[in-house]
Amino acid sequence: MNVRLYLWQRGTAAVMAPMILVHLAVIFYATHRGLTAADILARTRGSVAWALFYGIFVLAAAIHAAIGVRNVLDEWSPLKGRRAGLAAIGLGTVLLLLGWRAVAAVVAP
Amino acid sequence: MADQRSDLTASLWRGGRDGAYASYRVPLRENQTVLDVVTWIQRNLDTTLAYRFACRVGMCGSCAMTVNGRPRWTCRTHVSKVLRGGRIEIGPLRNLPVIKDLVADMRPFFEKWQQAKGAFRPSQTRQDAIAPIRSDSAERLAADAAIQCINCGVCYAACDTVRWNPAYLGPAALNRAWSLVNDVRDAGNAERLAAVAADGGCHSCHAHQSCQEYCPQALNPTASIAGLKRRTAQAFLKGEIKP
């Protein structure tokens, strides 16, 4: 870990913290109101706001998790240094692609 | 001289990395330190026992060892405090190579002090007037809080991150760097902040606080490292360092 990665990890955490609260509030709202999948999709499809919200969240989560996993690999696995970094970049890329794919599935018109 | 009432069993690490513990019977005295036990064994039972000490009064930081699994300064650790069922186990400091018996190789520890730019870099010459430093200034108070380190290596041996990450500079070196960062007479901070902000520097610390828990001087290296994290982050965002 160095200062650059440290700031990226803390920065993405700061971005995600309020977004998680919004996300939880949305879950409570949807379940409390008894919204069906069709109701939810009707609200999210074509919505630039929801696309931006979850798109940014996925990006922040992918960066945050990749840095954390790099640290875990570097300290606790045989993968050290550059190899740990490459593995973490791979994981972050997979998270990003899967996450954005999921976002696209609910916001694409 | 205290009364000699009975014995204790001391298990001492013998040999190098592949050594083993050997047991010795030592007279138990009313007032006795762990270092006294080791010295008694070396003088009375086995003169080949290797260990390190100097001042015997908690100033030099030479005699730190692992006592019953915990790193301690042995000259100030009373046997009565650590004896368990009449037994005591004494080994070399962890996280450092073993030279022989109870002697750990301190070179990695001190090399990291150098890497963390732990040497004072003067900003003035002896021809300049003595810099007036207020003892109650914020910088001086921060430096004073970190300055009483005796280089014993206890925090280094106690640190999980040192164990997991051989490149990590460790609590003592970073604590030293923090005391110098707050020393207004020092001129080496740009280089020092870059050194402690690189891989293996202050941001590798997980804040487990073992250093603070075990430091015989009751210092708080975790707080010093937190200070370095803040200061290096500010310097990085201002473009002053490029790790």
Image (cartoon, rainbow, N blue to C red):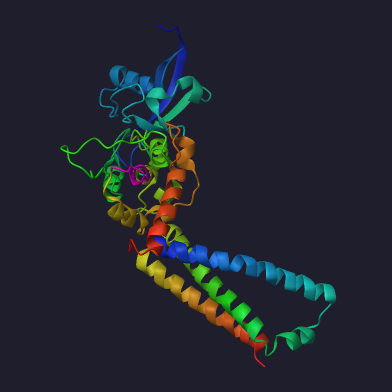
Q: Is residue B181 magenta?
A: yes
- Quarter of the image where one finds residue B89: top left
- Residue extending furthest toward the bottom: A109
Identify whether B169 is placed above or below B34: below
Does the magenta segment cover residue A37?
A: no
Residue B67, image x and y in percent? 43, 31
Picture coordinates of residue A109 (x, y %)? Answer: 67, 93
In the rendered image, the vertical position of residue B85 relative to residue B118, given as above or below: above
On-image quarter of the C terminus of chain B: bottom left
Count of numbered badges drawn on the protein: 0
What is the x, y in percent for residue A83? 38, 69
- In which image quadrant can residue B152 be found? top left
Residue B152 appearing in the image = yes
**Left or right position of A75 against A108:** left
The span shown in magenta is B176-185
- In this rendering, is residue A57 above or below B143? below
Task: Note whether residue A69 is visible.
Answer: no
Side of B205 where B19 appears, left or right: left
Q: Residue at x 50, y 23 (%)?
A: B81
The residue drawn where x is 67% and y is 90% is: A46
- Residue A37 x, y percent position in the rendering: 77, 84
Q: Is residue B228 above or below residue B238?
A: above
Between B95 and B152, the residue placed more toward the observer is B152
- Rendered-image quadrant of the N terminus of chain B: top left
Secondary structure, magenta segment, majority class: helix
Residue B110 quadrant: top left
Which residue reaches farthest left? B127
